[in-house]
Amino acid sequence: MRKVIVCTFLTLDGVMQAPGGPDEDATSGFEHGGWQKPVSDDEVGEAIAGWYEPADAMLLGRKTYEIFASYWPTADPGNPFTERMNAMHKYVASRTLTSVGWQNSSLLEGDVVDAVRALKASEGGDINVVGSGDLAQTLMRHGLVDEYRLTVHPVIIGSGKRLFADGAVPTALEPVSVTTTKSGTVLAVYRTNGEPTYDSY
């Protein structure tokens, strides 16, 4: 069974919107795009590279796919991520796209939940969900996320799309690894572990 892994950059207050630049996602008047680079460091990049090693595919929503497809095919070949991002298979969940042109990309057919269940049951390595907040919410609601790999950066934004928004499904998590970089970014890997338990003191 392949694992579906949500890989996401977060602010300390849980915002995942537009970490990469001011024009990445200005939905709902978001004015804080590009918040990640000033609070990141080389240890974050090394960790993310490691997170991609066991994966042979990405699962992307339309918006993230379009951002990536406009950048990576012509990105600096000296960037160690360029070859990896272009070579990996990209599964794209979209109700509006009719074709995808980035190499090794394919549209999921039919209901996205059924399609992802079929992907999980297929042969292959891990599948990383990158960005794609709406898609991640759908996968979480249907119990399709096996693991979270999160970089939690030392900055508070106060508004924007959050990975764990109101209505998130209660889920118990088992820590796999939690470390902190020199810049204060928390690198956290958690495995889903059923429903939470409750008790009192």
Image (tube, rainbow, N blue to C red):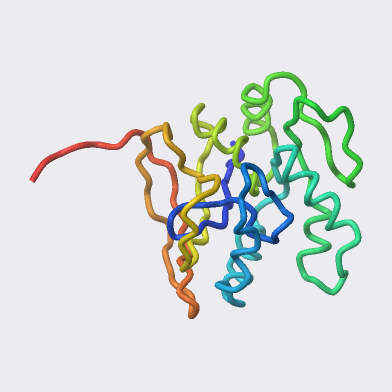
Answer with left or right where residue 118 lies relative to residue 83. left
Tell me if 194 is positioned left or right of 24 in this view: left
Nearest the eye: 101 or 134: 134
User: Is 103 positioned to the left or the right of 174 in the image?
Assistant: right
The quadrant of the image that shows the N terminus is top right
Image location (x, y in percent) of residue 107 = 80, 31
The answer to whether residue 64 is above or below residue 179 is above
Residue at 50% x, 78% y: name it: 183
View extreme (left): residue = 201
Which residue lies most toward the bottom here?
182
Q: Where residue 142 sits in the image (x, y, percent)?
A: 51, 27
- In the picture, residue 79 is in which quadrant? bottom right
Outermost residue, top direction? 110
In the depicted structure, whether residue 39 falls above or below residue 27? below
**Image position of 23 with respect to 113: above or below:** below
State the image quarter where residue 186 is shown: bottom left
Task: Say which of 90 and 18 sits in front.
Answer: 18
Q: How many marks?
A: 0
Residue in the picture at 62% in, 42% down: 28
**Percent position of residue 103, x then y:** 89, 47
